[in-house]
């Protein structure tokens, strides 16, 4: 419903009067561009003529724009120089000369930045994004179109703003993200309410048709394609008409209407032929070949894709060459030529792999620098040798030699990079092997150190226990001496009671503090011994746990009896109960078992 309301609104707003006026103004400008003084007004007239013929008559556009550039440089009119380079870049883009286009656009960018011309910069990013998109570099294309939107918002240039949004929408169609695509296309269409831009509306509607085609809503897609074609027919834009015919032709193939598809695609090829747009011709043939094959004209289909491949090779566009191999492979497969189809698929894959390798950032940057320098020299030679056929032939030969040299340099660079990468990987593997060996050695050392620490702590604990034993023996002797004194003083009641209290207190403190101090040190060293012991036998008594801790230190029955103030028989009885509860058969097994916990 949203789209239908907007369409009604646009159809009521847009008329052909503006188009007729543009045609009349172009004719007037052509008749009078050479009259008057050489000033900025004349530069602007030449720019307007170059802009009007940019996508329709490339040679005429180049003629006016080169005059505009020459006059702008003579007048020192920087804005005119910048716009001349900008539109020259656009013309070279339509002529499939992308290196020349990028060189001119880069010059325009520098001048726009010096002039703080945000509208000019926005158009620059749009033009560069178009080149990125055509080459299949969607990542950089998205970045450039986002810059278009950012700068257009600052200057409130709804035309460029809408164009940036629409371009993002078309990219997300190619990236198989129709939901994001339709979001951008809606925003773009909404901005068109402020303009009388029938061509812009037609472009958006055609892109929406692609979204519906991706979602397999083929009838809706055809509806939008047809409306876009009708609008483009009104403005008589041959390039846009060719684009519509290709979209409709490809959709007719999906619908099974092969005769109609052939008709549309041949019409697109005719339009591109009038424009001398060889890339467009090649793309038309690539779509036409499958349509002819489905229509039963196998021989003509093979000839058509063969012509497309030859043309793509002349254009030196590896992406299109790769697509031609894929389409030709599909045709051969459908015609039963499986071996040839397989060989063509291998060629397609090989080119795709090489394109992926070439797209590395460092190689691209280096090649761009080389091409910019070379194309700058070529441009100077072209401007100087215009009209001289002999010099042009020499220039073409020179460019061919340099191109082969660059190709050789590229192959050399790729070989060196591959060798360096292999060497780097080998070194990494060696380093990883050394690191793993060191890690194993460190782990073994840590294990040994930990074992030594535990043994040292056990020795310290045993020493502590023996010290407690000796202290207990000393306290016992003191108690015995006090008992002896008490017997001799039994007649003196007050002294006897005091001595007896001291003996009782010493005995109590010795028994209590001795174990507490030992237990504290034992837990610090063997912090999980009690937990492991109780997990093996939860019903152990406190006395059995104490005896188990002392046995863990490999103390004898006599030493344990002295520490705990129990008889040796009592200790033996406790050890017996421990063995039974733990399910052990002998004394040796008990001590070994406890020392392993």
Image (tube, rainbow, N blue to C red):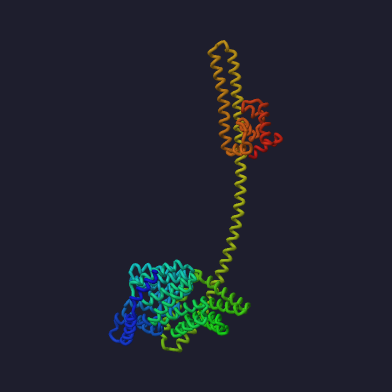
Give the camera-side residue of 173 and 408. 173
Q: Residue at x 56, y 69 (%)?
A: 418
Residue positioned most to the top = 491
Q: Using the image, determine if residue 400 lies above or below residue 570.
A: below
Front-most of 161 and 520?
Answer: 161
**Image coordinates for residue 19, horizontal then vertical, percent:** 34, 81
Residue shown at the point (62%, 45%) measured from the top left: 448
Q: Is residue 150 above or below residue 290?
A: above
Is residue 539 shown left or right of residue 323?
right
Front-lying residue, 305 or 509: 305
Could you tell me residue 10's position as x and y percent?
A: 35, 74
Q: Looking at the image, is 457 positioned above or below residue 108?
A: above
- Could you tell me how many numbered marks the image carries? 0
Q: Is residue 45 visible?
A: yes
Residue sitting farthest toward the left = 36
Residue lying furthest right: 585
Residue 530, quarter of picture: top right
Q: Quadrant of residue 3?
A: bottom left
Image quarter where the N terminus lies is bottom left
Which image quadrant is residue 86 in? bottom left
Rendered-image quadrant of the C terminus: top right
Instruction: Give how far across and how far down residue 231 sits, in percent.
Output: 39, 79
Residue 566 placed where, x, y %?
63, 26
Q: Is residue 398 visible?
A: no
């Amino acid at each position: 419903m949203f789209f239908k309301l907007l369409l009604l609104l646009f159809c009521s707003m847009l008329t052909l009067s503006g188009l007729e006026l543009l045609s009349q103004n172009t004719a007037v400008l052509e008749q009078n561009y050479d009259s008057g003084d050489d000033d900025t007004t004349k530069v602007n007239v030449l720019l307007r003529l170059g802009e009007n013929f940019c996508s329709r008559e490339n040679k005429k556009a180049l003629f006016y724009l080169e005059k505009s550039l020459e006059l702008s440089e003579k007048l020192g009119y920087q804005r005119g120089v910048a716009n001349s380079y900008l539109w020259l870049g656009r013309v070279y883009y339509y002529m499939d000369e992308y290196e020349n286009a990028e060189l001119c656009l880069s010059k325009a960018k520098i001048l726009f930045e010096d002039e703080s011309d945000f509208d000019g910069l926005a158009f620059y990013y749009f033009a560069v994004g178009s080149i990125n998109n055509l080459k299949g570099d969607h990542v950089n294309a998205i970045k450039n179109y986002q810059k278009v939107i950012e700068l257009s918002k600052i200057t409130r240039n709804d035309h460029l703003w809408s164009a940036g949004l629409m371009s993002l929408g078309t990219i997300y169609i190619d990236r198989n993200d129709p939901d994001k695509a339709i979001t951008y296309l809606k925003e773009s269409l909404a901005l068109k309410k402020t303009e009388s831009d029938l061509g812009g509306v037609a472009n958006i509607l055609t892109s929406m048709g692609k979204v519906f085609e991706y979602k397999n809503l083929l009838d809706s897609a055809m509806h939008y394609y047809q409306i876009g074609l009708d609008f483009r027919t009104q403005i008589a834009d041959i390039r846009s008409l060719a684009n519509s015919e290709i979209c409709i032709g490809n959709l007719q193939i999906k619908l099974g209407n092969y005769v109609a598809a052939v008709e549309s695609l041949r019409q697109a090829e005719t339009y591109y032929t009038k424009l001398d747009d060889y890339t467009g011709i090649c793309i038309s043939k690539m779509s036409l070949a499958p349509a002819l094959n489905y229509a039963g004209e196998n021989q003509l289909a093979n000839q058509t894709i063969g012509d497309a491949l030859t043309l793509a090779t002349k254009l030196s566009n590896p992406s299109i060459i790769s697509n031609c191999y894929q389409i030709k492979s599909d045709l051969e497969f459908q015609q039963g030529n499986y071996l040839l189809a397989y060989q063509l698929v291998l060629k397609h894959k090989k080119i795709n792999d090489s394109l992926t390798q070439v797209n590395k950032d460092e190689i691209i940057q280096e090649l761009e620098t080389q091409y910019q320098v070379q194309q700058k020299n070529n441009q100077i030679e072209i401007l100087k040798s215009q009209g001289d056929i002999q010099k042009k032939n020499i220039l073409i030969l020179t460019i061919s030699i340099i191109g082969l040299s660059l190709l050789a340099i590229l192959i050399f660079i790729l070989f060196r990079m591959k060798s360096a990468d292999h060497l780097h990987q080998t070194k990494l593997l060696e380093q990883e092997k050394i690191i793993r060996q060191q890690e194993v050695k460190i782990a073994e050392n840590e294990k040994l150190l930990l074992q030594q620490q535990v043994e040292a702590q056990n020795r310290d604990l045993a020493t502590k226990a023996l010290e407690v034993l000796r202290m207990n023996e000393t306290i016992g002797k003191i108690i015995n001496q006090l008992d002896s004194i008490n017997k001799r003083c039994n007649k003196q009641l007050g002294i006897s009671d005091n001595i007896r209290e001291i003996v009782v207190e010493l005995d109590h403190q010795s028994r209590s503090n001795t174990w507490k101090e030992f237990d504290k040190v034992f837990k610090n060293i063997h912090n999980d011994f009690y937990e492991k012991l109780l997990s093996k036998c939860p019903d152990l008594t406190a006395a059995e746990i104490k005896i188990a801790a002392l046995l863990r230190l490999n103390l004898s029955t006599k030493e344990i009896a002295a520490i705990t103030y129990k008889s040796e028989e009592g200790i033996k009885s406790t050890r017996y109960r421990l063995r039974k509860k733990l399910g052990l058969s002998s004394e040796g097994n008990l001590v070994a078992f406890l020392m392993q916990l």
